Amino acid sequence: MSSWDNNPVLTIEHLTMRFGGLVAVDNLSFNVGRGDITALIGPNGAGKTTVFNCVTGFYKPTEGRVVMNRSNGEHYLLERMPDFQISARAKVARTFQNIRLFGGMTLLENLMVAQHNPLMLASGYSVAGIFGLSSFRSAEREAVEKARYWLEKTALIDRADAPAADLPYGDQRRLEIARAMCSGPELLCLDEPAAGLNPKESAELNALLQYIRKEHDTSILLIEHDMSVVMEISDHVVVLDYGEKISDGTAPEVKDDPKVIAAYLGVPDEEVDAVEEEVGL
Amino acid sequence: MSVKSDNFFMDSVKDAAAGGLIALALFAVLIGMKAEVASGLGGQLGIVYRWGAVAVAVAIVFGGRLLLNLFVWKADTPVTQTAGSLLPNLQSFAPLGKYAMPIFLVLAVVLPFLLMSAYGARGSRQYLDLAILVTTYVMLGWGLNIVVGLAGLLDLGYVAFYAVGAYSYALLAEYFGFSFWICLPLAGILAAFWGIILGFPVLRLRGDYLAIVTLAFGEIIRVVLLNWYEFTGGPDGISGIPRPSFFGIEFTRGEGGFADTFGLEFSSIHRIIFLYYLILLMALITNFVTMRLRKLPVGRAWEALREDEIACRSLGINTTNTKLTAFALGAMFGGFAGSFFATRQGFISPESFTFIESAVILAIVVLGGLGSQIGVVIAAIVMIGGFEFFRGLEEYRMLVFGLLMVIIMVWKPRGLISTRNPSITLSGKKGKGISSDLVQEGHG
């Protein structure tokens, strides 16, 4: 029994997702350990993003259960919850493969939108806010401080009042992570956070994810193609192929799994070594 | 040089001649021959030839094409480019924008007195009436701006809420004898209620579908008002709607009237001035609430919704409720404006709430610049004021109106004021405006 099975933050049990005749995810079960960085990898079309969409409520799974175990002992059956409540109550935040920022709003505004629910409560559902009561103003100040903290952590503080769409690609990726963190998640789901980043940015991302995991009681589930990110920071790797789990274990275990090598490379054994070196496995 | 210019001229003439030839072929039949029932031939059909008119039409096409060739299409520096640079660009307006708000506000407050001193009580009445009309549209524009400009929901049936507000007041006054001051909030609440009723089933639709359903809703309300004869009076409308009182003091001649109470000489203009200040106050409240909400989480959620709905949901925002609040608030301000309309006119009928009204209000919002409050004011003044001002031109004003629209769409496709101001800044200063190229228009 591995460490992630003892105290999982997220349990996925027999998850199946069918789109008509296509089985995108087939009877998938795995655990995401509390405080771990878990990577979900697999070739293109393996069903990784579908799993994400099931976890964050954008799809309703055909079969199976997705259980979020919060650190305060509450359990949430995510497959039964509307998507916005998964973020608001079960504290699961996500980023998107194709970045979805509020481009016409400033960085600070983006992070303020992420703190919508606590601020809404503080503004007395806008009634107290219209009259400018002090309780709302102090809540707003706190929210700005939280946003400032994450802008500093992601090195975006200099451009806090610039529109998000003006940022370079790498900065937009980091802003999306900062925005997700501003909603105070216990599980952060990152869909290809390193896609399109250069090696330097990729290393910075690794440091940021390590920091989030260490300092913020936040477990991380990520989809990634960049093996340098996966192998360096993940505690636990789950490999999908054609919607089925083919391997599950620590990074070195998975790396040497012949099934994984076959799924990724699909070549006879004697050629594997050569290609393996090429991709840095 | 001369060779080139010779060629250039000859080419232009050839091209224009070709255009003229095509025009001749078309117009020879279209204009040149006209079937007419000649009275002299006992009701038989005959053809009347009009070669003079054809010659004129062909000459216009030839001349027009030649001029366009010489000065625009084949010229080294097209005239349009020079003309384009003559039009002011955004940057030159930037310092003006800072002072525009206070200037407009002061002007709006002193307007009745300015008019009174310039034209006298009798002469200023028509201008005051126009000012009331413009201000009503400013208020409607501001109300719709919440829905279309901030939340990005395309509402083509906004006039329905205006109608609900107007009929709420008229019917409550007729059946229960309620006064304007009681009915005003009730009309707003009822309009908001209808906003929610419409919103619940409709807000899961997006973009064009939402536009069509709201359009249909606007028509349904009008058709119900038209056909429910026993209750609403149908096409006869409702007349004798009570006029508003100055907090209980009627604007009547003699004892206990407004003029008597305040020791003034009675004049019918008092009520007009009061109505003007009333709608101005209501519009300013609309503006105040909207500007305030923009800086609150709900306002930011509206704008985020316009930018990206899926991202909103991933951040725990209940998008249905957020859309509903935008819809209900916009409807509420529409309802307030409607009950003001009813009390000003004293008579309402379904004819006042046709689709063209929705279109005009939407045009004000779009021309002014989505989400821009001051833009709505400018657009309302230009559109409603201009419309009334050019009444003397009769049907040609539609032509002027259309031309104006085309010019604005070419010159500033995102509306007059198209920059978005951040709702909050880290530095605490008023942030730099965000270019409209980056701001999404919403997908419903």
Image: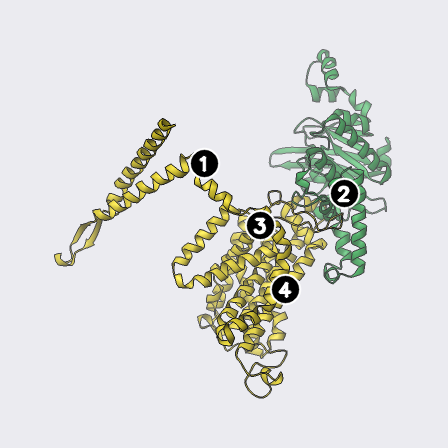
Mark 2 or 1: the one toward you? 1
Asked if marks 2 and 3 fall on the same chain, the answer is no
- Callout 3 crowding tier (Cα within 10 Å): few <14, some 14–19, many ≥20: some
Residue denoted by label 3: B205
Mark 1 or 3: the one toward you? 1
**Secondary element at tag 3:** loop
Q: CA distance from mark 2 to mark 3?
A: 27 Å
Residue B332: % across, % down: 61, 63
Instruction: Read off the chain for label 3.
Output: B
The residue furthest front is B2
Quadrant assignment, res B64: top left
For residue B165, side relative to residue B56 (left or right): right
- Colour yellow belongs to chain: B
Which three-letter amino acid code belongs to the residue tagged 1? Thr
Q: Nearer the viewer, residue A84 or A131?
A: A131
Q: Is residue A227 above or below residue B262?
A: above
Instruction: Read off the chain for label 1.
Output: B
Q: Colour of chain A?
A: green
Residue B136: % across, % down: 55, 65
Quadrant in which the C terminus of chain A is drawn: top right
Residue B167 visible (yes or no): yes
Marks 1 and 4 in Cβ contact (< 8 Å): no
Among numbered discs 1 and 3, the one appearing first in the sequence = 1
Residue denoted by label 2: A92
Marks 3 and 4 in Cβ contact (< 8 Å): no
**Secondary element at tag 1:** loop
